[in-house]
Amino acid sequence: MKADAPEHDEFLRAALRHAPDHALTPPSGVSQTILAAARRVHLNPRPASEPAAAPRAPVRRHVPWHERMQWLLTPRWAGSLATGLVGALVLGLWFEQDLPGPTVSGERGGPIAHSESTAPAAPPAPAPAPPATTSPPAPPAQDSATRSTGTPEQARQGGAAPRPRGDAAPKRTEKTPDSAVAADTPPKAEAESALRREVPAARAATNEARMQAAPAPAAAPEAATAPRRAADAAAARADSPGPSGTLPDAPPAATAKLGAAASATGASAAASPALTLWRRSTAESTARSAIWTWQPGDAPSPRSFDADAQAWLLRLVQAARGRWIDVAEVSNGQAATEVRWWRDDQPHARLRIESEGLRWIEPGGRIRYAPMEPAALARLRGF
Amino acid sequence: MNDALRLPPAAAQADDDDVALMAAFAAGDVRAFEWLYQRHHAALYRFVRRLLGRTAAAQADEVFQDTWLRVLQSKERYDGRGAQFRTWLFTLAHNRAIDVLRRSGREQPLGDEPTEGDPFEPDGVPWDHWPRPDEAIDNQVFWRRAGARLLECLEQLPSTQKTAFLLHHEDGVALDEISRALGIHFETAKSRLRYALSKLRTCMGAYLDAASLRVRP
């Protein structure tokens, strides 16, 4: 100390020692916090953005889980979590309300093409008791099940993307889904019985077992929807290729042409668009969730896609099963009989019955082709 | 304070030195820090409370805690060559307290801050009739009143002078070390201390009137 530094004032020093705060100590909570921080320093060798000089073994200390989660209780994180949850809830509700039923569900069916071409349709869920007078409408669950078997191309066209209508602007002439539904039953029953004669008994038994494995519906809806389910399953089986991987029931010439076309274009086997359309139109017409119309051949205007039309489409499904391939050509350059479908006045698909096969053209741009024998094509031209 | 703190760690037993304790703590001995804390926490808390005064007493815990956290963060940088641990510790607390006072706008202006070379001019007549501490040792009432009055007088000092007085008189830090720790010239530190002593003596004398000095022999 320098020589002229002021010396200690003993009186003031004594007064300091006797000050009322002389025995003051920090609160125990503060002390515990500081000492806990000291322990944590050695748990975490790099605390508070200070550089660590050398790595050392951290002192292990058991930290209860609720202490580790304390950061979640801070206003910042709690607010963020709450905001995220509310946002997710609102988005979920919004999607739930905004999505049109069949279309969007079909868009979600990523792996559906496989199940469509190889597996029978899933049995529909039970429905509320239908009116006893008419053919029972398909339950919403059935709609969902059918929608779940949609294909990616369905997703493309299901969005009802506006496309120019071209020459044939469809005008819905019949908006009587009730009558269409009422007349639905007899032809469907015929088709159903025909299909049942075709399928082996073992596969029918398997289908029945699957149907029984589904949640037990009410008795009346079960009885009413069973034929439709059986028809769905039969149609799916009819459309799927045979176990050998070849084209069952396909004439050798058609098979050869199909192989040639596939090898020439690099095309591969595709799911049946006819079966997809049949399933969807049947389900939606029955549930009255959409209005389907079609214009077969030389018909002057679109007409209701009624039971007869569905039966014709089912014949098409059977005739062309396992033959569909993706192609690029929109036409073979020859005249053909055209069939068009509309869903809620929006173009849905176009079929060209050409001289050597069927060409399925969708508004989304996907084109599929099924080589056919002339006799089969001729039968299909008889609507 | 828990019982563990009363037991000095092995490092403290071998070398009862703050620097050694800090080195032991930096090497991973948590109990070395606990011992350091045990040795200095009361004096540091008292220093912080007095430095902040009544108006900023609510921030005393914060300043005290931040000071020790800075010690934790600087455990590997402190080597004892710059200043004694206690001086360094109190300097950390002083800087933090000044920050708090500045932030709250309660720091007193430095209008009477002495500059280097200014002659010492006591702002009043020093009161020199205090009893000697050993003579008044039995009169606890007097000294308690004197201590309470001193705290009142400290409230009137600028923080710089208060720091100089508290470090010098309460904690026994030499002036040259105060000047080094605070980063000021020695003469500045000395002037601050002299101003502080002068004001405190005057303030204490004004309070301890003749009637209260009956203890005086």
Image (cartoon, rainbow, N blue to C red):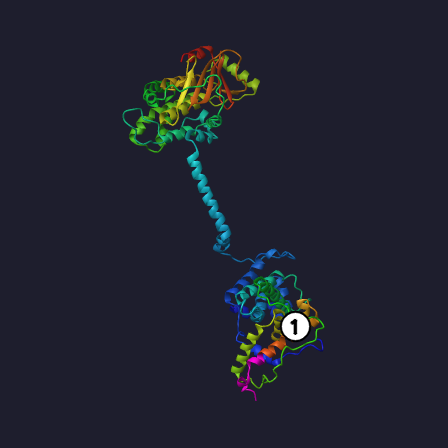
Residue B166, above or below B214: above
Q: Quadrant of the N terminus of chain A?
A: bottom right
Q: Residues within 10 Å of mark 1 (few under 14, many from 20)?
A: many
| Residue A133, image x, y percentages | 27, 25
> Closer to the camera, A336 or A141?
A336
On what subunit does the disc labeled 1 rest?
B
Left or right of A86 on screen, residue B183 = right
Left or right of A3 on screen, residue B10 = left
Q: Amino acid at mark 1?
A: Arg
| Residue B147, image x, y percentages | 55, 78
The residue wearing badge 1 is B192
Left or right of A175 on screen, residue B180 = right
Residue A310, above or below B4: above
Q: Picture quarter containing residue B108?
A: bottom right
Q: Quadrant of the C terminus of chain A?
A: top left
| Residue A172, image x, y percentages | 40, 20
| Residue A38, image x, y percentages | 57, 62
Residue A249, above or below A127: above
- Span shown in magenta: B204-217
